Image (cartoon, rainbow, N blue to C red):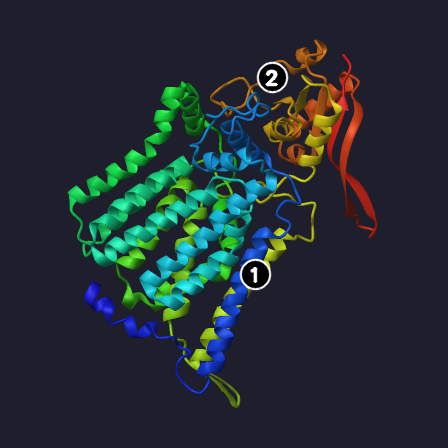
Amino acid sequence: MGEAAYESLRPLRVHPWSTGALARPLAIAGYGFIGGGFALAVFFRFWHLNTVGFNSDEAVYAGQAKALANDPQALPFFPVFRAHPLLFQTILSVGYRLGGGDLMARSFATAFGIGTVILVFMTGRLLYGHRAGLLAALLVALMPYDVLVSRQVLLDGPATFFAVASLYFVARYATSLHRPWLYAAGAAMGLTILAKETSILAIGALFVFFALSPEVRTRTRDLAYAGAAMFAVALAYPLAIHFAGGGHRGQNYLVWQLFRRPNHEWSFYPSTVPVVMGPLVVACALLGLWLLRRQMSWRETLLLSWILVPAIFFQLWPVKGFQYLLPTAPPVALLAGRMLALWRPPSLTLRAFRLPGAVVSVALCMLVLTSVAVETWSRIEPRDKSVFVAGSGGLPGGRQTGTWVRKNTPLGSEFLAIGPSMANLISFYGLRKAYGVSVGPNPLRRNPAYEPIGNADLALRRNEIQYIVWDAYSAARSPFFAKTLLNLRRKYNGRLAFSVTLNLPTKSGATAARPLIQIYKVRS
């Protein structure tokens, strides 16, 4: 379907609440609901934002930012060149130079999430009109997936922001064929890669889009210029690695990523991502592709390319992370917003009552938005506080543990934990060296950023390690290494020095203290 044909759809952009006797009340109610929804979205992102300390990944990226800020306490534990590009960490380093802490870092991440909402509105308005843009932005603003990730100091939120900026610039180019927009898309893609290297998959999405959209006339020369703009921006990271002498670490990390073992079942994404995006949001996106199939154009090709290329790649890739598919959430929301804005539902007759199509449309919008808002609230304020999902929030007790370590253990003390998750928190908050007993010496089987302990038994016997740290989260994921750690604790007469507990309900209705983190002082 060409541009001229799509222009015939523009009358559908007229607000369906703008006609009839109910026009004014529905418009007031609709925009009031939308305004309240955006206020609720900001509330969700800042609600108890800093109550729980960082998780392992947050500690790593914040530690890198502190190292970039030349913090002498962080430099021994968090090398600048560790695993990923440094765009977000560099931005965070400014805040740390000004004396910011955990709240500052998470607020920076949240700002990128709010910026993504704004870009989704701009993209939706450009592609499908004002109402579709509002609805798509509100879906992202309230979506559990985006809220959960943007509340954390992770790279995926900023990468999604720049990916949506690239999407917007491509859409501007496709609607105007004005070449500077294409070059701007290339530069934004370079920033996306600098935020997180896996975002390079968006290049494949663009190739698919241009190959399947002949109506968007593009010269090979212009694509080359856009590619040059992208590489010119993205080149900043490899150049920094080269001149800083950190190239070997990046190469080791690439080898590890290529050969590491799967960390989830193949069904992880199909069973997890639609739930955190919102089942009704995904259903509206799919249903809209069918109900509005006669109105298909390059717009839907662009959004589907942006969704399917990374989704297929990460589904086939053995390593699966909770937040890896976040860049696909905005185009899904845009397709859902398209359906909610452009599809005109028929009137419904219930006995003696007749509901006009406009009322049905408003009710459907409110149902979908309410569903994602309720799910988001259940995630950021869960009833069962004993369930901790990797990548969905901070690690309870980690900050308290690190603070105790910093205040109550001698400088130079070394710690042995089950895995790198708790070891990173000990290093970040406690400023002490920590190892993970699960980190093996084979570089093909471990993250090269983590230093292996080698023979933990020998290190304890020589008194090179003075403390053992057990935590419930790592123990649930790695029972074998948790058992190994506890055996070492018994062998070397570990004495409980610190404990974090959580009061949880029992089957009888009473409450009992459950240990989350325990630190043992050992004697060889």
In this rendering, does residue 51 appear at all? yes
Q: Quadrant of the C terminus?
A: top right
| Quarter of image, res 239 | top left
Q: Pick the residue in front: 143 or 472.
A: 143
Residue 443, position as x, y percentages in the image: 48, 20
Residue at x 77% of width, y 29% of height: 498
Above or below 157: residue 423: above
Q: Secondary structure at mark 1?
A: helix
Badge 2 density bin: few <14, some 14–19, many ≥20, Cα 10 Å: some
Q: Find disc 1 in the rendering and name its residue.
A: 40
| Quarter of image, res 468 | top right
- The residue most toward the top is 462
Q: Earlier in the sequence, mark 2 or mark 1?
A: 1
Left or right, 110 with respect to 426, comes to left
Q: Pointer 2 and pointer 1: residues touching (CB < 8 Å)?
A: no
| Quarter of image, res 202 | top left
Badge 1 density bin: few <14, some 14–19, many ≥20, Cα 10 Å: some
Q: Pick the residue in front: 397 or 239.
A: 239
Left or right, 289 with respect to 52, comes to left
In this rendering, does residue 152 appear at all? no
Q: Residue 453: give its label.
A: 2
Residue 113, position as x, y percentages in the image: 48, 50
Measure the C-alpha gap from mark 2 to mark 1: 47 Å
